């Protein structure tokens, strides 16, 4: 994997981090905004798993474990938020 490609991914991760921070500080955090922030976080996690952990070209079992853990974590956060607003 080229250094240029990883630099582009890193910049995208930094932009996504600034975007989620901006959303969290400057908007009313309704359920829709929470879902948007979690979706951005899921994309960031996916990019980290695929590129920085170098799991893009390995068997699906390892990628599946990591992606499953990411989805489980984000689902628990969303569930906790949903239960907290009730």
Image (cartoon, rainbow, N blue to C red):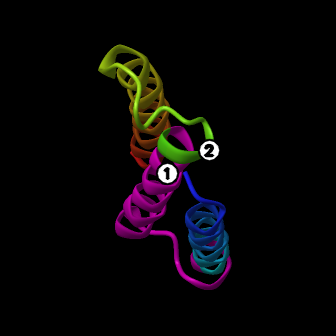
| Residue at 56%, 64% in the rendered image | 9
Q: Quadrant of residue 79?
A: top left
Q: What residue is pinned by disc 1? A: 47
| Residue at 39%, 57% in the rendered image | 39
Check if residue 37 falls in the magenta segment. yes
* The C terminus sits in image quarter: top left
Q: Position of residue 77 (x, y in %)?
A: 50, 38
Callout 2–callout 1 Cβ contact below 8 Å: yes
Q: Give the Cα distance between marks 2 and 1.
A: 7 Å
Which is nearer the eye, 38 or 30? 38
Q: Nearer the viewer, mark 2 or mark 1?
A: 2
| Residue at 52%, 55% in the rendered image | 44
Check if residue 80 falls in the magenta segment. no
Q: In the structure shown, which secondary structural element does the residue marked by tag 2 occupy?
A: helix
Which is nearer the eye, 63 or 69? 63
Q: Quadrant of residue 20?
A: bottom right
Q: Position of residue 33 (x, y in %)?
A: 43, 69
**What's the mark number on residue 52?**
2
């Amino acid at each position: 994997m080229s250094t240029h490609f990883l630099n582009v991914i890193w910049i995208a991760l930094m932009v996504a981090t600034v975007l989620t921070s901006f959303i969290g500080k400057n908007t009313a955090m309704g359920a829709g905004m929470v879902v948007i922030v979690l979706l951005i976080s899921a994309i960031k996690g996916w990019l980290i798993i695929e590129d920085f952990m170098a799991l893009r070209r390995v068997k699906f079992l390892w990628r599946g474990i990591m992606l499953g853990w990411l989805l489980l974590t984000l689902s628990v956060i969303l569930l906790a938020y949903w239960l907290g607003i009730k």
